[in-house]
Amino acid sequence: MSKLSIIVPVFNEEETVPIFYDALEKVHTQVPEYDFEYWFIDDGSTDKTIASIKALQTKTDSVHYVEFSRNFGKEAGLYAGLQHATGEYVAVMDVDLQDPPEMLPEMLSGVASGEWDMVGARRTTRAGEPPIRTFFSDMFYKVINKISDTYLVNGARDYRVMSRQVVDAILSMTEYNRFSKGIFSWVGFKQKYLPYENVERVAGSTSWSFWSLFRYSIEGIVAFSQAPLTAIAILGVVSFLASILGAIAIFVRALVVPASAIGGWPSLVVIMLFMGGIQLLSLGIVGRYIAAIYLESKRRPIYIARDVK
């Protein structure tokens, strides 16, 4: 009998853990030819999430967990789950049931048939989300797909089923600064995405704020595009050429109209502020890439586990 490992990163989700498990077990009855293995990755929760997981363990041997020593982020949770999964097929899901469990049999069938190596899910609507978040999300996909060689499907979720070959390829990428959506696309293989409409959380509240999502998008751009560095290099060349042309224009004007050489202080101040702003922006972009290099060079572990069972 083939095994499906289900990776579930959790952070302060004590209410949703048992609900999620019950929902997946109902789906399990539709694919009895597979063994289900659950890996809950507790990302330093401060509530009773780990207690909820341990309570499930007393009922079944199919539930396992990795408890982090502190909060390392969802990306670390996904990596830890992939490391510990033992199934021939591996699924990644959110515990809040915004990833519809009823799609799992079709996704699993697509991979098990050999037609696809990875079958994921993508949202076609964002009903229930703030309009500003929807706008910036759409803009992120438009921008990164223009500046990166790795194409990201708009609305794609981490929710997917993968073959063991795909999982091994992802695990071979041991980078510290991880952006899973980009990694899933970068490894290639035969991929397919099933559309679905947005689903509200079954319980609790999300830990993703607008600011955390914004930072996550910046990490994605830095990880999969060098376009910002190219842009500031071009900006520097343009600014240099503009300054040369401006100097020539001022010199010619001073020769033709000597009196005009005295004025121009306001425009000079504006130009200085403009150039200073460009320099600070450029330093900030370069600094973000240097920070990524700095973290990679430390070779710190992606996560530290307090307990694994």
Image (cartoon, rainbow, N blue to C red):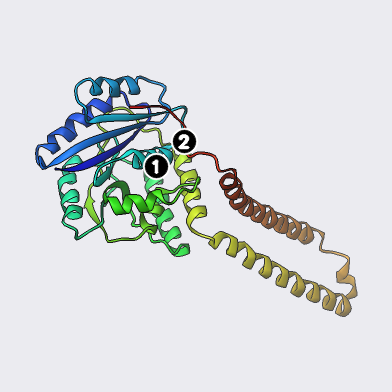
Residue 174 higher or lower than 306, as above or below: below
Label annotation for residue 79: 1
Q: Residue at x 19, y 45 (%)?
A: 104
Foreground residue among 199 and 242:
199
Q: Give the quadrant of residue 230.
A: bottom right
Residue 233 higher or lower than 106, as above or below: below
Foreground residue among 172 and 79:
172
Label annotation for residue 303: 2
Residue 38 image offset from top left, x and y in percent: 25, 34
Few, some or many C-alpha atoms within 10 Å of disc 2 (few <14, some 14-19, many ≥20)? some
Query: In the rendered view, does 151 fall on the left or right side of 226?
Result: left
Query: In the rendered view, does 90 fall on the left or right side of 235?
Result: left
Q: Earlier in the sequence, mark 2 or mark 1?
A: 1
Foreground residue among 244 and 29:
29
Query: Callout 1, which amino acid?
Result: Tyr
Query: In the rendered view, does 280 fall on the left or right side of 199?
Result: right
Q: Residue at x 40, y 33 (%)?
A: 207
Residue 166 image offset from top left, x and y in percent: 32, 53
Q: Secondary structure at mark 2?
A: loop
